[in-house]
Amino acid sequence: MECKSLDDGMVLRNACADDIPAIIAHVRAVHGEEVVDGIRAMYESHPRMSWEDTFVIANPDDGTIISSLVLLSGTWLLDGVEVETAQMEVVGTLEEYRHRGYSRILNEAFERRVAEIGPVILVIAGTPYFYRNFGYEYASPLGGAYPVASTLIPRLPEGENEPVTIEEVTQQRIKDFLEFRSVHLPTGTWLKDIREEDFQYYSFDCSKTDTEGWFFHLVREKKRLVGVFVLSRWAKNVDIICLHLKNHVHLDSVLRFASARAREWNNQTIRVAPPNQPVVHEYLRSIASVDMQQRYAWYVKIPSIQRFIETLSPVLSQRLRNSEYNKHETTLKMTDYKRGFSIRFSDGRFEGVSSMNERDLGKYDLAAPTGPLTRLLMGYETLDELKSHEPDVLCKAISVPLVRTLFPKVNATVDPFY
């Protein structure tokens, strides 16, 4: 991107490696000391971060970073299908420069870059309501966890040793972690992809015990790998995320391990993201004795509905094959009131999606404005939920079962990894 002078004398440009000290000073002022280590690692070693994807508004006189935004390319997964994402991160403006429209200027630069690289969805976890101004929709929960009081964690019987050993993952062992995780990934939920090349970034050195960090672990029973998990340390919490165990009884050992680390780090709260295995999940609930705490939200924008449908076509075909539409040839015509789309299926398989220019709403099976349609496509709300409170969501009675089949509820568990 070419450097652009703004009306107030500041400049909009891409950042570069020489800007890292100024960026860190900006992050410290806007976001706090606890995130500095992670943000520095993002700029220095994130495998999918490019300087072309960093945008700053700077004072040309002294190099001060006034406002910043980063585009992180990544992948969300749904039932094994990879969905390319562009995640907006490190968004912020120095307090004394706010309310000058800098976020809008940075978002316009972000959108131009998005048009060049063509992700399937755009996502941002952030400020309540604010990103709706840029066309985003709350369409996925931001993780969630069960708080577990230390007094509720089962004690190891006196005289007995832990039935498992827990070791922190090294670069040489990250493949073991990812292979075990891949076998135990849940279905019917959005997940964030983790790749082998990500580990160097995720395992950055923390300068203090009160800074954010991620710590990957293997659980072994007599040298046999029986589980994996990540300790996510942030905001005086220790969260157990990416938890996958072969046996629910090993959860006690993981909780005792996390409790010991929390004491070392002077953290007060242990929380556990819901495991995908039903038995482990129910056992966790019985220990926690409280409801799950939801975090905030992922805001989502779908730049091209046609490309979104094409990307998720294997998932749509699988949903049809498990329904009464298995052998049917059928078409679903839908509109967001601006554009129309025709999705074709034959013998329970996706055949294609094409645009429609039809203005007559009567020609469509489903009509929904952009916001509700985004929530439907992402599986955050079902058709029936939307129709209960969205008067502009219309669906022909004959098409209701098909829409229910294609777009069911998806209980997303996307943790806020950068």
Image: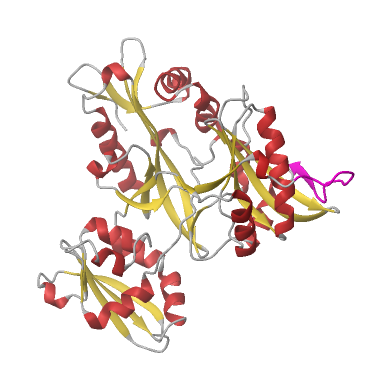
Q: Is residue 282 above or below residue 110?
A: below
Q: Residue at x 27, y 19 (%)?
A: 97
| Residue at the farthest top position | 62
| Closest to the observer, 349 or 398 | 398
Q: Residue at x 24, y 32 (%)?
A: 105
Q: Does residue 166 show up magenta in the picture?
A: yes
Instruction: Please say whether residue 92 is visible from this viewpoint.
Output: yes
User: Where residue 206 appears, x then y in whole percent?
Assistant: 62, 26
Quadrant of the image for the N terminus? top left
Instruction: Please say whether residue 169 is visible from this viewpoint.
Output: no
Q: Is residue 140 above or below residue 62?
A: below
Q: Residue at x 50, y 47 (%)?
A: 415
Using residue 393 as the reference point, say whether residue 350 is left or right of it.
right
Say which quarter of the image contains residue 31: top left
Magenta highlight: main SS: loop
Say which quarter of the image contains residue 53: top left
Using residue 22 as the reference point, say whether residue 219 is left or right of it.
right
- Bounds of the magenta segment: 155-169
Using residue 164 as the reference point, say whether residue 263 is left or right of it.
left
User: Where residue 307 appears, x then y in whole percent?
Assistant: 34, 62
